[in-house]
């Protein structure tokens, strides 16, 4: 384990100051206020896959790697919809997932928001409607485009979503 | 003989069942009026889901099958439609009344069930795991899938094969290059051209990088599920770096739509990254080797016995970790560039973990040998009607793809993802473990849900 700590100290903090961090700096106070006021200090997200190719999930998992370290922004993923403010939805919404997704949504306490992640839930991406695809009919508040959106764009998307509360 | 796939297609007068084994292909024509055929599930248990799927999609009955429950048709799916028949062309169907699915459950005093999913606690794909428990001890597990069933096989029917490349790219995000490669091989065969050596080499490089990224991700998540988070921090950093290299090489972090007739690979980038990667993985290996509490969790856990693996026709990482030498790359082309079969011994979580490390080293070595500056002129030609099959070793295992082209259009498209057979053997691995080991075991296999469900 010592070996690891040696390496850990040598590596230092690699979390990137992505270009939007500067923008973030400016709106940080406001975002914090908003998050504080609307989300009790932290924005809790429940991710649900309604029929994706799994790349959108992989990019969400990447948000927790040391380069992005999403939690530093007060945004974190939760295990239960009952703990969530936001439902983050990926995938085309298959026939077989339809009722489960609605169940998850209904379990969320109000106020609640839905963000669609990636092109699949928005316009089916490259796919086409089949008998096995229902499409999304949740009340969607915000969309993060991309196939898949990369981690940087997902974070940007969250910030844009939060900015909406400034109005 | 190993069963690779059993699937159906509709012809003018008859239905046809195609059984693909490793040594032969059997075709059976069956009558359309009362379609039925003998089940082979007693001998080949991996046929269970294949037959259930055929029954759901084509309405063909299986004589002597012991599992008559629907597979892709879930509780509210209309029972009387057969979506893969040619006379079905609806794009929209309505929900039916809820008909409960009868899970495999063990009943008795003090025995209870733990249903897990389809939506899970973490950021993973949906699927259902149905445990019968006696306290912490697992008595039985049924794995139930097809929540992500998108109807892709039907979606691509009637299209020009070149039109569906973007869809092929996005069937299973972690195996995108493998799917693209399987499809590219089919297109090459259908247009009667040989893929030139240098292009093959570059395709192989991309396939190996995809494998490396998948393995790196798992090497972080497996220890994490045993409660050892530093490994995840270390490996998620490394896999992010590898993904960025993938992006620089292909213009996409998952290399969607990257397998073209001409591929450019920046060898300099590889020369910089691969030695670094190798050093980091070596460090990781030594570091993890010294953590006995982690091996306590990984050793003896989630054992897939060689016998069961053979019985189910398990493929890929899971099979090799149980000591079965099966890998599509075990051919002259790959051996020429340094492929070495990696094998585990006991088929436990620890074996799959170690196997992934060794496969990364082998992939790095192969990429170094596969690098090439040369380029040939190459173009896929005109597509000829016919039936084509291909095999590719994805990061999970053997991927089988079938395409039938008629009048220049896709008549039938079929895929058997490696996960499709491996999932069926999954339940055999948990009987000596407690339910808390399940996430760890699941991660050590890291099978695809999207590819399984299609
Ligand atoms: S949007 Fe693209 S990357 Fe995301 S799930 Fe759909 S196909 Fe996959």
Image: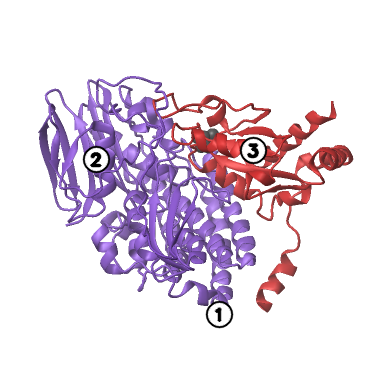
Chain colours: A red, B purple
Query: On the image, which quarter does residue B90 sit in?
Result: top left
Image position, residue A69 (x, y; %): 71, 52
Residue at figure coordinates x 50%, y 34% from the top left: A99
Badge 1: chain ID: B
In front: B331, or B111? B111
Q: CA distance from mark 2 to mark 1?
A: 46 Å
Residue at figure coordinates x 62%, y 36% from the top left: A106
Badge 3: chain ID: A
Residue, disc 2: B389
Residue B377's place in the image compared with A13, above or below, is above
In front: B348, or B184? B348
Nearer the observer: mark 1 or 3; the answer is: 3
Residue, disc 1: B292
Residue, disc 3: A87
On screen, residue B432 versus residue B323, left or right, reads right
Disc 2 within 8 angstroms of ligand 1 (CB):
no
Q: Secondary structure at mark 3?
A: strand
Q: Residues within 10 Å of mark 3 (few under 14, many from 20)?
A: many
Image position, residue B70 (x, y; %): 31, 40
Q: Secondary structure at mark 2?
A: strand
On screen, residue B269 versus residue B151, left or right, reads right
Image position, residue A129 (x, y; %): 43, 23
Q: Residues within 10 Å of mark 2 (few under 14, many from 20)?
A: some
Circles 2 and 3 on the same chain: no
Residues under numbered marks 2 and 1 in contact, where contact means CB atoms less than 8 Å apart: no
Residue at figure coordinates x 67%, y 37% from the top left: A153
């Amino acid at each position: 384990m010592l070996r690891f700590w040696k390496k850990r100290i040598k590596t230092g903090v690699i979390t990137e100051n992505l270009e939007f961090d500067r923008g973030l700096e400016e709106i940080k106070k406001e975002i914090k206020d908003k998050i504080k006021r609307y989300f009790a200090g932290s924005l809790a997200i429940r991710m649900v896959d309604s029929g994706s190719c799994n790349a959108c999930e992989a990019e969400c998992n990447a948000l927790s790697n040391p380069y992005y370290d999403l939690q530093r922004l007060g945004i974190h993923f939760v295990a239960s919809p009952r703990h969530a403010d936001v439902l983050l939805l990926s995938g085309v919404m298959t026939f077989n997932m339809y009722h489960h997704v609605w169940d998850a949504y209904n379990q969320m306490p109000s106020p609640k928001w839905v963000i669609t992640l990636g092109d699949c839930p928005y316009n089916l991406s490259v796919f086409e409607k089949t008998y096995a695809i229902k499409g999304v009919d949740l009340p969607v508040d915000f969309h993060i485009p991309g196939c898949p959106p990369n981690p940087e764009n997902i974070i940007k998307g969250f910030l844009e979503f939060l900015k909406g509360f400034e109005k | 003989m190993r069963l690779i796939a059993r699937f159906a297609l509709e012809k003018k007068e008859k239905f046809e069942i195609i059984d693909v084994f490793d040594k032969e292909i059997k075709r059976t024509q069956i009558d359309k009026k009362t379609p039925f055929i003998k089940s082979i599930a007693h001998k080949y248990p991996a046929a269970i889901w294949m037959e259930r799927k055929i029954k759901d999609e084509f309405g063909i009955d299986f004589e002597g099958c012991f599992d008559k429950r629907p597979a892709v048709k879930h509780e509210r799916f209309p029972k009387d439609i057969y979506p893969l028949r040619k006379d079905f062309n609806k794009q929209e169907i309505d929900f039916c009344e809820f008909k409960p699915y009868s899970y495999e459950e063990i009943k008795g005093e003090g025995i209870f069930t733990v249903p897990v999913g389809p939506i899970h606690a973490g950021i993973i794909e949906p699927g259902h795991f149905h445990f019968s428990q006696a306290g912490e001890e697992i008595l039985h597990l049924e794995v139930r899938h097809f929540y992500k069933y998108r109807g892709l096989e039907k979606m691509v029917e009637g299209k020009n094969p070149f039109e569906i490349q973007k869809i092929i790219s996005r069937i299973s995000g972690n195996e995108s290059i493998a799917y693209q490669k399987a499809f590219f091989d089919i297109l090459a065969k259908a247009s009667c051209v040989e893929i030139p050596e240098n292009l093959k080499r570059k395709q192989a490089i991309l396939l190996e990088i995809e494998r490396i990224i998948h393995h790196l991700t798992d090497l972080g998540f497996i220890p994490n599920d045993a409660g050892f988070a530093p490994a995840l921090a270390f490996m998620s950093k490394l896999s992010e770096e590898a993904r960025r290299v993938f992006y620089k090489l292909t213009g996409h972090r998952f290399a969607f739509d990257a397998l073209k007739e001409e591929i450019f690979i920046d060898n300099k980038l590889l020369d910089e990254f691969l030695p670094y990667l190798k050093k980091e993985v070596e460090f990781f290996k030594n570091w993890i080797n010294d953590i006995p509490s982690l091996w306590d969790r990984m050793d003896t856990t989630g054992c897939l016995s060689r016998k069961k693996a053979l019985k189910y026709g398990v493929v890929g990482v899971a099979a090799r970790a149980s000591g079965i030498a099966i890998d599509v790359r075990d051919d002259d082309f790959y051996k020429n560039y340094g492929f070495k079969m990696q094998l585990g011994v006991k088929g436990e979580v620890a074996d799959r973990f170690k196997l992934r490390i060794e496969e990364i080293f082998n992939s790095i070595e192969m990429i170094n040998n596969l690098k090439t500056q040369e380029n040939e002129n190459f173009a896929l030609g005109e597509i000829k009607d016919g039936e084509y099959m291909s095999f590719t070793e994805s990061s999970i295992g053997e991927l089988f793809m079938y395409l039938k082209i008629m009048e220049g259009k896709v008549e039938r498209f079929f895929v058997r993802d490696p996960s499709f057979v491996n999932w069926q053997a999954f339940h055999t691995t948990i009987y000596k473990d407690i339910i808390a080991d399940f996430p760890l075991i699941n991660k050590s296999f890291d099978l695809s849900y999207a590819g399984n469900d299609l």
